[in-house]
Amino acid sequence: MDSIHKKTAIVGVAESDLGRVPHKSKYQLSAEASRAALDDAGLSIKDVDGLFTTIITEGGEMSSLVMAEYMGIRPRYTDSTSIGGSSFVAYVEHAAAAINAGMCEVALICHGSTNISDRGGRAGPVSTRSSVYGPMQFEEPYGTSTVSSYALAAQRHMHLYGTTSEQLAEIAVATRKWASMNPKALMRSPITIEDVLNSRMVSSPLHVLDCCLVTDAGGAVVLTSMERARDLKKRPVAVLGTGEAHTHRMISQMPDYTETAAKISGKLAFERAGVTHKDIDVAEIYDSFTITVLLTLESLGFCKKGEGGAFVSGQRTAPGGDFPMNTQGGALSYTHPGMFGIFTLIEGVRQLRGECGPRQVKDAELALCNGTGGVLSSTGTVILGRT
Amino acid sequence: MADTPHKPVPRPYQDTQAYWDAAREKRLILQRCRDCQKFQFFPRGVCSHCLGSALEWVDSPGRGVVHTFTIAHRAPHPGFANQVPFVIGIIELEEGVRMMTNIVGCDPNSVRIDMPVKVTFEEATPDITLPQFTPA
Ligand SMILES: [Zn+2]
């Protein structure tokens, strides 16, 4: 019998200011999102005894120490696991384990980033360093970047399975339709498949509209035991199943360019939740790039390997389609601070609470959230349920 | 000219000094494990297949095929500004390991997956020479 799942709930979620927020630090964005998520739960920062956080580091910040100090707390459970944008989804598993083991009672997961303000714009250089220490010296001298890394996977998928740029564009177009119904989304004007194909090529076969936004943003999620959750402000959202996995750090070491660790983390999450793919009402899939979504859908088992292009065709993931996905507008159109995982959880919870207004998926009872981190390196999968 | 930033270059360390020393002599060398006989790339202090330490360096003829590639249209670092568009490839060597490279000496639009390639060498700085690949 599963000892941690179904006994933990998400009780609070919130974003900070989103978009371009040059007058606030990443720490402030993280802390303000935390305050709002705790308020959403009817809790205060004084209730938090478990802290789970990572921030994009310039040189080895000890994220949970930094954020606990910033917010004036002394947690008895601490976790700065740093596996990229999926970290926050993986934290749900860690927090559920800690809560059920009695190591903490109220777990705060938070993130803040000033990615756009720090870089001085979307096209700012990724790096200006002149020498590379460590294993990345076998990649950086060849001019690799995050987008090029994902492009290597896209090219291989196209070669093996005949996947097309039009099929990848379907994802960007559908996601923009969801964003048009979210006032907090940065990009809300409709786009067409032709717009994506005609947008500037960044790293073939990925165009600029295949790529996520770069924004400033913070987000936070609060968890506690199901027992305590029942006494809080809103109806709890149950953590039904979780999984995490990683397969490599550098893109040159990726074992299979057409499959992510979601094959492992997704299987674990489905098994632990005791549900099947057809039970999922809404999917929040980290969309750092359109190819990320396509590989993830296949790896999670929503379709067979190689069939992701056909799966997303015909605007299947758009409003009104039979696979509602990335309903807040995703990293492609809503916000993307460098690590997006926490926002998949926030939207999944809101959908299950029925708080999403015009973009609400009717009668949503089960949500799947999947984060991908690094360069298709790590994944966290969480299945959430309405209570 | 002196103000033009150069591309980022490797700073050799314990695991990689021999590799970069060989590259400067225009040799591609790979690590093979004496215990499990497998090759690995990138160089490490232990074998990533069996965690043993019995690693030996083997000269590679530097032949392989393009496993996947991308044409980068944006410079990720100021040192690449005058090189775009350029090709980043993952090469699968005959020894079975994969490595990142640029694919040079050809029209970027002519690069294909499974295309045979061979190693060539680019002097990035007086101290550092980068293995690169070109159509075979
Ligand atoms: Zn070995």
Image (tube, coloured by chain):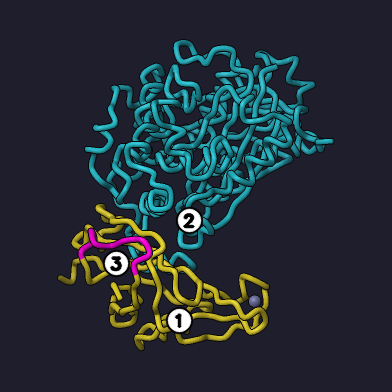
The Cα atoms of the two marked residues, 3 and 2, are separated by 21 Å
Give the prevailing secondary structure in the magenta stretch.
Answer: loop
Residue neighbourhood size for the residue with mark 3, other residues' Cα within 10 Å, grouped as few (<14), some (14–19), many (≥20): many
In this rendering, position of residue A215 left or right of residue B105: right
Is A145 colored magenta in this rendering? no
Q: Nearer the viewer, residue A324 or A149?
A: A324
Q: Residue furthest right?
A: A1
Eye-nearest disc, 3 or 2: 3
Q: Amino acid at mark 1?
A: Tyr
Q: Secondary structure at mark 2?
A: loop
To which chain does the residue with label 3 belong? B
In this rendering, position of residue A356 left or right of residue A271: left
Q: On residue A59, which mark appears?
A: 2
To which chain does the residue with label 1 belong? B
Tell me what residue is drawn at x 25 percent, y 53 percent.
B73
Chain A display color: cyan
Q: Secondary structure at mark 3?
A: loop
Residue neighbourhood size for the residue with mark 1, other residues' Cα within 10 Å, grouped as few (<14), some (14–19), many (≥20): some
Tell me what residue is drawn at x 65 percent, y 36 percent.
A92
Please tell me in which quadrant of the rendered image residue A75 appears. Answer: top right
Q: Secondary structure at mark 1?
A: helix
Tell me what residue is drawn at x 26 percent, y 70 percent.
B104
Q: Which residue is mark 3?
A: B7
Q: Nearer the viewer, residue A140 or A271?
A: A271
Q: Nearer the viewer, residue B68 or A86?
A: B68
Q: Which residue is mark 1?
A: B19
| Place of residue A97 in the rendered image (x, y in percent of width and height, measured from the top left) | 75, 38
